[in-house]
Amino acid sequence: MRLKLRDLIGTLLVLAIAIPYVGYLVRGEMPLVQDPRGMSAVGLLLGTAAFLVVRSGDELDRFGRGEIGLAVVSLALGLAALVFAETAFAEVLLAVFMASILVVWLLEIAHHAGLVHLHGAPTAHA
């Protein structure tokens, strides 16, 4: 398979999350992102958009259901990071959320590039 325009757009959206996050880690804030709550919100909005763009038009096979499951876990992590942004473990929760966005994006891109294949269970030969 070949990557498509939607994969490029999704990648750009993920970069739009990663660049401010790295700046946030280095400087403690970025324009429009002053705290974990702001970074969580950016991740939720752009991460959801990236997933919807990259996932659009895909068939719902077993691997696709797994990708959707991982995206739901990532969404839950993002919501938790947003809700618990004022707590002591906000930065750790935000880091786990950001890593989950990266994992979902990597799996989607690898799947679209044909690097990940889902086969049935191996059969035993007698």
Image (cartoon, helix red, strand yellow):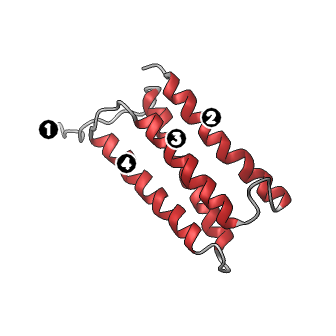
Q: Nearer the viewer, mark 3 or mark 1?
A: 3
Mark 1 in CB contact with mark 4 (< 8 angstroms): no
What residue sits right under mark 3 in the picture?
50
What secondary structure is found at the residue carrying circle 4? helix
* First-in-chain label (2 vs 1): 2
Numbered disc in front, either 1 or 4? 4
45, 76: nearer the viewer: 45
Q: Position of residue 38 (x, y in %)?
A: 67, 61
Percent position (x, y) of residue 90? 65, 72
Q: Residue at x 52, y 69 (%)?
A: 80
* Residue nearer the viewer, 65 or 110: 65
- Measured Cα–Cα span from mark 2 to mark 1: 50 Å
> In the rendered view, does 92 fall on the left or right side of 121?
right
- What quarter of the picture does the N terminus occupy? top left
Q: Amino acid at mark 2?
A: Leu
Secondary structure beneath label 1: loop
Q: Earlier in the sequence, mark 2 or mark 3?
A: 2
Q: Earlier in the sequence, mark 3 or mark 1?
A: 3
Q: Identity of the amino acid at label 3? A: Ala
Q: Could you tell whether 17 is left or right of 4 in the image?
A: right
Q: Quadrant of residue 14?
A: top right
Q: Earlier in the sequence, mark 4 or mark 2?
A: 2
